[in-house]
Image (cartoon, coloured by chain):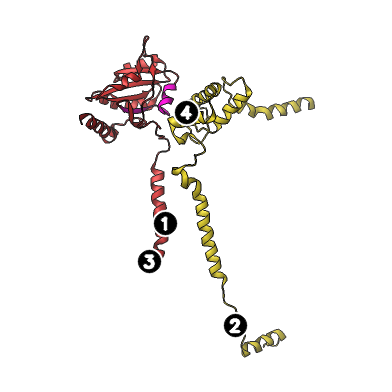
Chain colours: A yellow, B red
Amino acid sequence: MRYFLFPLILFFLSMNAFAIGVDKDRLNDPLLEARAQQMMKQLRCLVCQNQSIVDSDAGLAEDLRAIVREQVMAGKSDPEIIAFMTSRYGDWVLLMPPFKMTTLFLWLGPFILLLVGGFLVFRYVSMHKSTPEPRPLNADEEKRLNQILKGSHK
Amino acid sequence: MLIKRFLPLIIFAGIFVAFMVGLSLNPREIPSALINKPAPEFSLPPLKGDGVGLSSENLNDKDTIIIINFFASWCGPCRVEHPSLNQLSKLAGVKLYGIAYKDDPKNSLSFLANYGNPYAKVGADLKGRNAINWGVTGTPETFFVKDGIIRYQHIGPIHDMQFDTDIMPIINKLRQEVGS
């Protein structure tokens, strides 16, 4: 039983390997294939939108993967492949939006909000810090305090 | 300090408007990056026989509004918009061409036999590579081309009710350019 159980556990543990889709037309050169996959991870599947074309099984994603592989094989540089995609589908095809005039607020907005919020917190705290010094006790209060401390305030 | 009292309201109104505009956009409609740019070069085989079914040379007709419709027999919404296409093909000064996207030509032909063929010419984009050059993300999509320049793109089916509100204004605008 023990000889049988361990391989069985290993078999079931390896099941998720079958969940990964593998294209038939992978490049033979592992270095080029790795570069192609690196590019695919940056490209958005235009049908499923929040997946990269690596993650998607949509027909269009499959076609775009084939194009990336062809262009890598043809010796195109990374910026050339990106330009091929953006010239057809615009910046939307990139999962990481580029830093430019129209995306300025997208990239800098969080930091601007952080600065504004930090300034407001700083102003709020410094306004409430200056609570006045408590005034000294007058004669009556002093007398009462002493009574309380002695335990004879009744 | 009137402005200080109303500042939260002003900020709220700003966010409200931004969300109202942002959330009413359809994220599925990704405009092609080729609008107001020259249409891509292509040459596609016909649905039947040899030779050229449709090529970029067909886009250069002077004083004609060229409409390119990407369709497929397997595409449900394409059936929905077919009456609109039949209507489009009858307009004066307009030429409607079809590109069958990743579709078996036999199926495209029987689709056109069943629903009517509004296209002056049809090209078969068997592997869908030409569609990628146009920035197409799915069928149906319709491009309006004049003098070789892509002027407008309609994503998704042209519904009956959109014909007068969306399509005719574009055609009338392009017609005015022809007239002047």
Q: Secondary structure at mark 3?
A: helix
Query: Is B95 located above or below residue A109 in the figure?
Result: above
Quadrant in which the C terminus of chain B appears: top left
Instruction: List the residue tagged with mark 3.
Output: B2
**Membership of A68 in magenta stretch:** no
Chain letter for the residue marked with disc 2 in the picture: A
Instruction: List the residue tagged with mark 2.
Output: A135
Query: Is B59 located above or below residue B19 in the figure?
Result: above
Q: Secondary structure at mark 1?
A: helix
Residue positioned most to the left: B179
What label sits on residue B78 in the rendered view? none
Q: Is residue B12 visible?
A: yes
Give the CA distance from mark 4 to mark 1.
40 Å
Identify which residue is drawn at 51% across, 61% down: A120
Chain letter for the residue marked with disc 1 in the picture: B
Identified by mark 1, the residue type is Ile
Disc 4 vs disc 3: which is toward the camera?
4
Identify which residue is drawn at 50% across, 26% down: A64
Image position, residue B11 (x, y; %): 42, 56
**Are callouts 4 and 3 both on one chain?**
no
Chain letter for the residue marked with disc 4 in the picture: A
Identified by mark 2, the residue type is Arg
Identify which residue is drawn at 44% across, 22% down: B129
Give the CA distance from mark 4 to mark 3.
53 Å
Instruction: List the residue tagged with mark 1.
Output: B11
Residue B66 is left or right of residue A46, and the answer is left
Which of B73 and A136 lies nearest the eye of the viewer?
A136
Identify which residue is drawn at 39% across, 41% down: B25
Sequence-first tag of 2 and 4: 4
Residue A91 is left or right of residue A147, and the answer is left
Q: Which residues are magenta?
A: B128-145
Instruction: List the residue tagged with mark 4.
Output: A84
